[in-house]
Image (cartoon, rainbow, N blue to C red):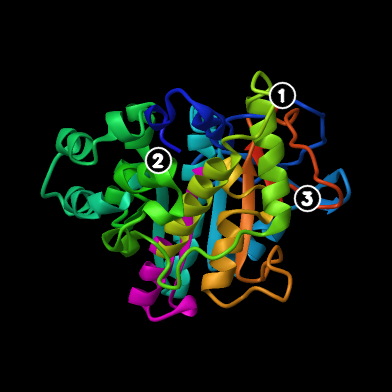
Amino acid sequence: MGRWGWRGGFLAGLMVLGLSWGAIASGTVWAAEGAEELAIAVRQSVAVERWEPVLAEDLWGRLGRSRRIFLGEVHNRESDRDLQIAVIHRLFQQSVETGENFAIGVEMVQQQFQPVVDQYLTGEIDEGALRLGIEFDDRWGYDWPSALRLFRWARDHRVPVVALSAPTETWRKVVAGGFGALEPEDGRWLPTDGLGEPSPAWLDWLGEIYDQSHRDLGNRAGFERFWQVQHLWDGAMAAAMARQFDRWGGDRGGRMAVIVGRGHVIYGYGLPTWTARLFGSAGADPDQTDQSAQTVLLLAADGEESIPWRGDRAPGDFVLSPAPMEP
C-alpha cells in the first residue's frame, strides 16, 4: 500500500504488508541460471517449515503453466526490483515463444491513472509527465528511480502495465464509514459481484498483524476498518486483473506478472484467493487456489532470509533471492 496514504491512526499497521519480516531462519539455496544477467537462487516449499533447492528448469516449467505469477516484494528494497525484472524478462521470453499475451500488474499505480501509463508506454509522454500524471509521490511515495526501471523495461519491450490499486478517494471512504460509505461510482474499481465476506483464516492472520502494530492500544477497536480497507484493496487489484484477462478473451488468453507487497500474497491469502474466486478456480475451501493457474513467488534479500510458516501452510510456492557470486 502507498507509503504516504497510511499516516497516523490505526491504519499505520497496514504498512507491514509491504515490508520485510527480516532474517528469521537460514536456508540452503541453489544458484540457478539467470535471466537478463541476474543469477537467481530458488527454494521451493516441500513440508512444514522446510524448503529445498530446486533446479531452474523446474521453476520456469511451473511458471510457464501459470496464468498469474505473483511477485511478493518488500517495497523499499532494490534487490527485489532486480529479481522482478529478471523474472519478468524470462516470463516475457516464454510468452514470445508461445505467442501468448503478457502484461505486468502493479500495485504502485491506482486504476484511474491507467491512461497515463498507456501514454508513457506508447511514447506520448516522457518520464517526468508519467511521475506527475500518476501522482506517484503523493499516492505511493517509494523510490521513483526504482519504479522507473520497471516502467522503462515495459516500454522498451512493449509490454502493457496494468494499474491495479483502488483510488485513495475510495478506500478513504471505508476508513471513515466502512463498506456502507462506498458510493455507486466506487464500484467501477471493484469486483462486479461486490466484496463479499473474507475468509476466517485470512482474518485470523490479519488480526495478528494488527495486534503486533497496536500493542499500545490493548484492544481491537479499529480492527474492523483495518480488515475492510485491506479486503477492498485486494479485491480492487483482483478486479483490475480480471478486466485485463477479459480483454484477452478469458483466463487462457494471456499471462500476467503481478508486483505487489508481500503481505498481499503470503500464504496464498489476499490477492491469490481473490483471483482464484474471480477466475473460477477456487475449490470448496475459499483459502485454496488452483496451483496450475497461479504461483506465488516471495522475494528475499539473500539466502539467509526466510519467512515463517503458518501452521502447515507455506508462505509461498517459491522463494527467490539473488544467487551468491561464484568464487
The structure residue drawn at horizontal position 72% and vertical position 30%, both measured from the top left corner, is 305
Using the image, tell me which numbered label, if any, was put on residue 176.
2
Q: Which residue type does callout 2 highlight?
A: Ala
* Residue located beneath label 1 in the image: 327
Within the image, what quadrant is residue 302 found in? top right
Q: Is residue 25 above or below residue 177?
A: above
**First of labels 3, 2 by sequence position:** 2
Please indicate whether residue 284 sits to the left or right of residue 238 in the image. right
* Residue located beneath label 3 in the image: 314
Q: Which residue type does callout 1 highlight?
A: Pro
The structure residue drawn at horizontal position 71% and vertical position 44%, both measured from the top left corner, is 205
| Span of residues in magenta | 240-261
Q: Residue 294 at x, y = what percent? A: 60, 64
Q: Which residue type does callout 3 highlight?
A: Ala
Q: Is residue 288 above or below residue 155?
A: below
Whether the magenta-drawn stretch holds residue 72 is answered as no
Q: Residue 49 at x, y = what percent? A: 87, 43
Residue 153 appears in view: no
The reply to whether discs 3 and 2 touch (Cβ–Cβ < 8 Å) is: no
Secondary structure type for disc 3 = loop
Q: Residue 171 at x, y = what percent? A: 39, 46
Q: Residue 10 at x, y = what percent? A: 53, 29
Foreground disc of the pair 3, 2: 2
